[in-house]
Image: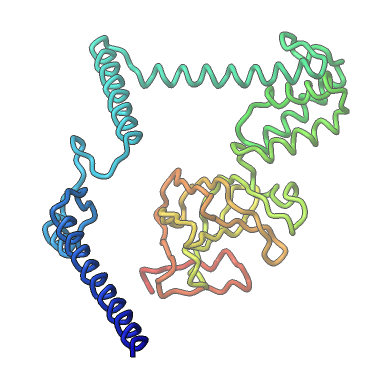
Amino acid sequence: MSSRNTIRDEGSDAQTTQQLTIGEAIDDESGLLAEAECGEHDPELRPTVELEKQGRIDYDWSRKAGLDHPYGTTLEAEERRLGEERELDRYRDRALAADRAGLDRERSCRVQTEWESSGRVRDFRERGVLGSGGDPDVDPRERLDAETLGGVNRYGMHLAERFRGPTRATYAKQLAEKVACQNMGLTAAVLKTNEEVAKGTDAIQPIGTIAEWMGHPKYSIQANVEAEMTTLYQPAAVNQQQVGVLEDGSGTAKVTIWKRSQVGTVLREGDRIRLLNCEVGWYGGQPTLACTSESEVSVLERGDGPSPRNGTVTHANFSGGSRRQKLDVLRG
């Protein structure tokens, strides 16, 4: 009996200890909660869902960032903006001072740009002549004999007739530099100069010489043409804006202006136009011209002929390519 009572007493003591431990834990937790409620904590910087909703409602979405109070800009962007404003103020003060002094800043800038450009070209040519063993202060034509000088002048005249722009003397001097300073033969100098001028961006090529200098049909190149629009056809494809025939006295060529080229100029029959950087291709064994996004179309003289383009009701037959197939959109 005593052993049973001892065991019962030990069990009751353990239960009492367990109950006291739970009670103390509850008291401690209550104390911790009370202390947490009364304690000081950092403010909550993250907005709640209600604050975000109210912020979207109260925000003025129609307002713009003003110069005095830019919205969402960094310190670097702010400093860059202030620097640009001060630079513009300096430009304005300089322009006003020049206007009060009666100075033509546009003309002076143009003269200065031309002088700097000519200086760079002169330095480049001097470096080329010096590298070839020549003297930039001496005309290379003076170093040629009479027979070679006659050939240089003759081929210079042919190049001037073939490529519009530089004079005969300019081409003759270029040929003389290659012959006298670079020890090239006259024929090689002519071919080299012809290749350099044909690849230049400012040279206007006659249409009749396109098939000669363009080379292989697989390799398309760019050309500059100045001619008259003699005939305009109704485009046969939806991606073509205008299709016609150009003539400059040396030959004729078909030209296509694509819609994706973004050419805003509408051509008429009889227009005297200048095409820069137009693609040279082949159609039916003949060279053709195409205006792309890199091309420039300028109307030098306006004609009084019709202006058919994609969207009109007239049509033309491209099989024969006859120049007599002129369109009369007024009658159609």
| Location of residue 4 in the rendering, given as x and y in whole percent from the top left corner | 34, 88
Horizontal side of 9 relative to 213 (left or right) equals left
Nearest the eye: 63 or 262: 63
| Location of residue 62 in the rendering, given as x and y in whole percent from the top left corner | 16, 54
Q: Residue furthest bottom?
A: 1
Horizontal side of 231 relative to 49 (left or right) equals right
Q: Quadrant of residue 6?
A: bottom left
Height in image: 72 above or below 1? above
| Location of residue 120 in the rendering, given as x and y in whole percent from the top left corner | 60, 20
Height in image: 19 above or below 97? below
Height in image: 73 above or below 246? above
Horizontal side of 16 relative to 244 (left or right) equals left
* Residue drawn at x 82%, y 15% as measured from the top left: 133
| Location of residue 161 in the rendering, given as x and y in whole percent from the top left corner | 67, 35
* Residue drawn at x 58%, y 51% as measured from the top left: 278
Q: Residue furthest front?
A: 2
Q: Residue furthest left?
A: 58
Nearest the eye: 217 or 84: 84
Nearest the eye: 19 or 84: 19
